[in-house]
Image: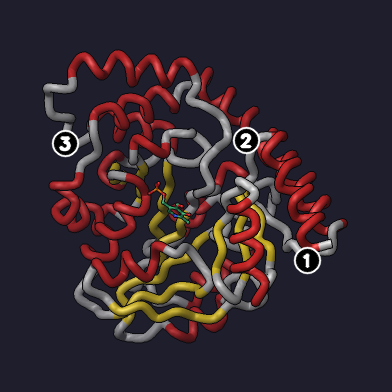
Amino acid sequence: MNETPYPPLPSLRRVVEEGAARLHRYPDRLAGALTAGLARELGVDPGSILVGPGSAGLCQHLVQALGPRPEVVHAALSFEGYPLIVRNAGATAVPVPMDGHGHDLPAMAAAVTARTRCVLVCNPNNPTGAALRRAELVDFLDRVPADVPVVVDEAYRHFVTDPDVPDAMDLYRAYPNVCVLRTFSKAYGLAALRIGYAVVPPALAMAVRVVGMVFFPGSLGQAAALRALEPDVTGELERRCAAVVAARDRLADGLREAGVAVPPSQANFLWLPLGERAGAFAGAARAAGILVAALDGRGVRVTVGSDEANDRFLAFARDHLG
Ligand SMILES: Cc1ncc(COP(=O)(O)O)c(C=O)c1O
């Protein structure tokens, strides 16, 4: 599930343990402290920040709130949650085939019509790890009408090392229709707490708040996320992300040496385009005690783990595919 291999930092764990003493109290449904902390960190108005139960939950609130146009455009093959989110929000997905392992942005722009509620762009993309560069995203945003929101899902932003991959917050500042989705689940290692945030144009924020009002995140998630924004924690998390990135690149090289055409990844996972062999490979991996995600007929996604786990997986892949 693309979690970090690291256990929670002691400072974050402490916040959660302390919060346990107040479990009989409801959380702040406006997530005021965390919203203010994020606003400070990102340099935006607190009114444009939405905090919710994971970025997947927020994504659904967004898609619901952005109605009533019926269609949501997204890439296929992208985050497996999108088709479910779109359906749960009462919309119809318009999946646009990939250009290789990445989004086909010209085709996605062409798929936008008067029926389009919003566009979901996953950068870097799950499950392929491919990242869109600044110039192609800017070209895309120039083509999409300003009244069609473009949601840039940056769940894996912390693992990006290519300087040409834009920070979606810069796009948010430059275009009136860009929304940014981020999560504390991956790089921050808080997946179990279900906490993420969105930055949306202020005009849309109120509509999303109304839809999301019964979905506010729990107090432990709010407290841990707020603590995670402090410099001592971000510094340590950045070191951990750098280690994951180094391990990612080593694992990719090893797999390529083993003959797998692994595309470049800017996330904390790799895509093995095994086609029809995907299901059998994942089944054999499971039997060997290694859990990977198979998309039948397409490929296998493997999350970068500890050095030991990566070595075991590489040895398995060499044996199985060699
Ligand atoms: C692209 C993408 N967006 C969102 C999510 C959901 O993350 P969260 O735990 O914040 O709901 C995931 C999780 O796998 C993801 O891959």
The mark closer to the camera, 2 or 3, is: 2
Front label number (3 vs 1): 1
Rendering coords of residue 225 (x, y %):
38, 30
Say which label, 3 or 1, has the lower sequence index.
Answer: 3
Give me the residue at 54% from left, 81% from top.
97
| Mark linked to residue 29 | 3
Image height check: is 21 above or below 129?
above
The 10 Å Cα crowd at callout 2, few under 14, some 14 to 19, many 20 or more, is many
Residue 116 point in image, percent of width and height: 33, 79
Looking at the figure, which quarter contains the C terminus?
bottom right
Which tag, 1 or 2, sits closer to the chain's start?
2
Q: Amino acid at mark 2?
A: Cys
Q: Whole-percent x and y of residue 244?
A: 66, 38
Instruction: Tell me the tag on residue 261.
Output: 1
- Circle 1: residue type: Ala
What count of labels does the image hold?
Answer: 3
Q: Is residue 237 left or right of residue 65?
A: right
Q: Earlier in the sequence, mark 2 or mark 3?
A: 3
Q: Tag 1's secondary structure?
A: loop
> Observer-nearest residue: 138 or 37?
37
Q: Nearer the viewer, residue 60 or 318?
A: 318
Name the residue located 79 percent from the left edge and 44 percent from the top edge: 250
Q: Disc 3 marks which amino acid?
A: Arg
Q: CA distance from mark 2 to mark 3?
A: 31 Å
Residue position marked by numbered label 2 in the rendering: 241
**Real-space CA distance between mark 1 and mark 2, rounded to the nearest whole angstrom:** 24 Å
Question: In the image, which disc is placed on residue 6?
Answer: none
Q: Residues within 10 Å of mark 3 (few under 14, many from 20)?
A: some
Q: Residues within 10 Å of mark 1 (few under 14, many from 20)?
A: some
Q: Is residue 134 visible?
A: no
Disc 3, disc 1: CB below 8 Å?
no
